Image: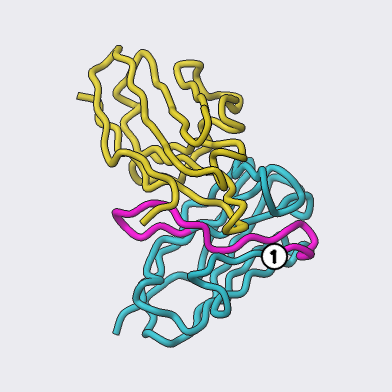
Amino acid sequence: EVQLVESGGGLILPGRSLRLSCAASGFTFDDYAMVWVRQVPGKGLEWVAGIGWNSGIIGYSDSVKGRFTISRDNANNSLYLQMSGLRTEDTAIYYCAKADEYTFGRGNVFDVWGQGTMVTVSS
Amino acid sequence: QSVLTQPPSASGTPGQRVTISCSGSSSNIGSNYLDWYQRLPGTAPKLLIYRSNQRPSGVPDRFSGSKSGTSASLAISGLRSEDEADYYCATWDDSLSGPVFGGGTKLTVL
């Protein structure tokens, strides 16, 4: 079964750091690009970051550029999101999703999603 | 504020046909394929329509998508109670160099 499982969320103080993980199974992880997408409760989906199969192409939304770092470990079928300088507006459910092709970019279709992990940034 | 604009809500009765719109601009919908995702209550988003009008295996043909210019729409025919969910449109934005999503439309089956 194709599956993505996120972990690492929780309650964190503003300004602190947190690392999210996404464990992939049921498919050849290093054949596909991956992304992180978040959703503030009650709001729409927002793309956060994306990474190609070999980490050669990486992109970030303007709202997290310079604060968040996406990475992957193909040997361990894992995707990560290192978040620093967290702000209250980063409070959201964070989903990892698989793209349908190896490169991150135009035309990506996100065909598998995890259940999400909640990040709450609050003092 | 989402880059793609969707109505916040839609509704219909069982058996009816409903459509959900999604509007954007020349840098996103106008120059790229559009996808639709369905999020049932308490679950992860699920790909519903890709490349504007293609259905992944397992998605009933009651669901269809179309695109014209800088707008797109999702049509659901023969509405069923299990279609009650949030629906999101998505595409690539050439100006932002990343995927963009609509704000979502909550579909209620009356």
Badge 1: chain ID: A
User: Badge 1: few (under 14), some or many (20 or more) residues near its Cα, within 10 Å?
Assistant: many
Q: Residue furthest bottom?
A: A15
- Is A113 or B106 nearer to us in this picture? B106
Query: Does residue A102 lie above or below B23 as drawn?
Result: below
Q: Is residue A71 above or below residue B16?
A: below
Instruction: Where is residue B70? Give x, y as percent.
Output: 50, 36
Indicate left or right for A96 with A40 as reference: right
Pinpoint residue B55: horizontal percent, then vertical percent: 57, 25
Q: Which residues are magenta?
A: A38-58
Examine the rendered structure and indicate whether residue A59 appears above or below residue A33: below
Tell me the residue at 38%/51% (across/down): A44
Q: In the rendered image, which quarter is residue B82 located in?
A: top left
Q: Quadrant of residue A111?
A: top right
Q: Colour of chain B?
A: yellow
Residue at which label 1 appears: A58
Expressed as whole percent of the image width and height from the top left, the position of residue B34 reads 55, 36
Secondary structure found at label 1: strand
Query: Is residue A41 in the magenta section?
Result: yes
Locate residue B20 relative to residue A19 in the image: left or right: left
Chain A, which colour? cyan
